[in-house]
């Protein structure tokens, strides 16, 4: 049985499943559920943190400063690793809306902290990475699953205006080349994002995602949900030579429409 940590801010209520990656398993705004529920697979539900890497890593191989390779788990999307240890590792509850995870090998000694704070009509979600004695590359991000359909209103629409996108190879990994954004559907990483990304359900709700992250992944190829993911670096960042920041914060602002 999962251990749930509940936060109630009046208009916004959260349930955080500590045993399932300390992810948001339920978020309601004025009674409207804004989270895709569990549907049988680890990767496809809730709002969860990604770290010490976000997205795929080619062949699950990560290298230290001396070029020595270490094997990451590839059980979810073989032959590649995906989304870090945060989904399956053991999180500790440190306070109200405050959690931490100590990573296993090869990231032994590194740690990530996660905080949730409910404001009047917004959720502040933050991550911080502490490398400790670990010198491996790291990057992280947020992976919220938004339902395509709410209890009322229209189907979800994504208001998102990127300047550039990473060319995606046949293996779904970015090649490192920046190109003009294509039309969706997307499973892609973008940069030079203009304005504030927003998910909208006409005649129901909108959620703005305020974050100064330079990289965003958008996924809208699922029949039940869509994802808009701020990240400190793109998928396979270490192999692209891109270094991620050690902290990231996003503000999810809710408005009934």
Image (cartoon, rainbow, N blue to C red):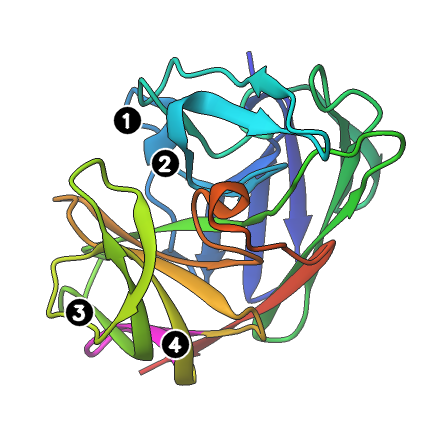
Considering the numbered disc 4 on the image, is that residue within a helix, a strand or a loop?
strand
- Where residue 49 appears, x then y in whole percent? 56, 43
Circle number at residue 197: 4
Q: Please give the residue where the numbered disc 3 appears in the rendered image.
A: 153
Q: The residue tagged with tag 2: helix, strand or loop?
A: loop
Region in magenta: 197-208
Rendered position, 234 above or below 80: below
Cα separation, mark 1 vs mark 3, equals 23 Å
Residue 39 image label: 1
The residues tagged by marks 4 and 1 sit, at their Cα atoms, a distance apart of 26 Å
Q: Is residue 26 left or right of residue 169?
A: right
Q: Residues within 10 Å of mark 3 (few under 14, many from 20)?
A: some
Q: Position of residue 250 (x, y in %)?
A: 59, 66
Looking at the picture, how far across and down is residue 207, in whole percent? Answer: 41, 72
Mark 4 or mark 1, which has the lower sequence index?
1
Is tag 2's residue or tag 4's residue first in the polypeptide sequence?
2
Q: Is residue 9 visible?
A: no
The residue carrying mark 2 is 45
Q: CB under 8 Å between callouts 1 and 3?
A: no
C-beta proximity under 8 Å, tags 4 and 3: no
- Res. 75 mark: none
């Amino acid at each position: 049985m999962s251990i749930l940590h509940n936060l109630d801010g009046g208009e916004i209520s959260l349930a955080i499943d500590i045993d399932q990656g300390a992810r948001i398993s339920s978020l309601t705004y004025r009674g409207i559920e804004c989270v895709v529920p569990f549907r049988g697979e680890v990767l496809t539900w809730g709002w969860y943190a990604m770290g010490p890497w976000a997205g795929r890593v080619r062949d699950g191989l990560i290298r230290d400063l001396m070029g020595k390779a270490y094997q990451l788990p590839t059980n979810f999307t073989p032959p590649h690793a995906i989304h870090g240890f945060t989904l399956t590792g053991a999180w500790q509850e440190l306070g109200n809306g405050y959690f931490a995870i100590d990573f296993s090998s090869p990231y032994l000694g590194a740690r990530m902290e996660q905080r949730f704070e409910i404001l009047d009509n917004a959720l502040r979600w933050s991550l911080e990475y502490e490398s400790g004695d670990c010198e491996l590359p790291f990057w992280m991000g947020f992976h919220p699953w938004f339902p395509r359909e709410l209890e009322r209103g229209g189907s979800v629409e994504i208001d998102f205006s990127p300047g550039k996108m990473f060319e995606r190879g046949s293996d779904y990994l970015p090649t490192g080349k920046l190109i003009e954004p294509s039309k969706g559907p997307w499973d892609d990483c973008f940069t030079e994002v203009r304005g504030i990304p927003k998910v909208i359900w006409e005649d129901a709700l909108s959620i703005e995602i305020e974050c100064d992250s330079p990289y965003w992944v958008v996924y809208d190829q699922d029949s039940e949900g869509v994802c808009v993911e701020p990240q400190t670096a793109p998928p396979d960042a270490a192999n692209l030579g891109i270094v991620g920041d050690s902290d990231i914060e996003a503000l999810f602002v809710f408005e009934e429409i």
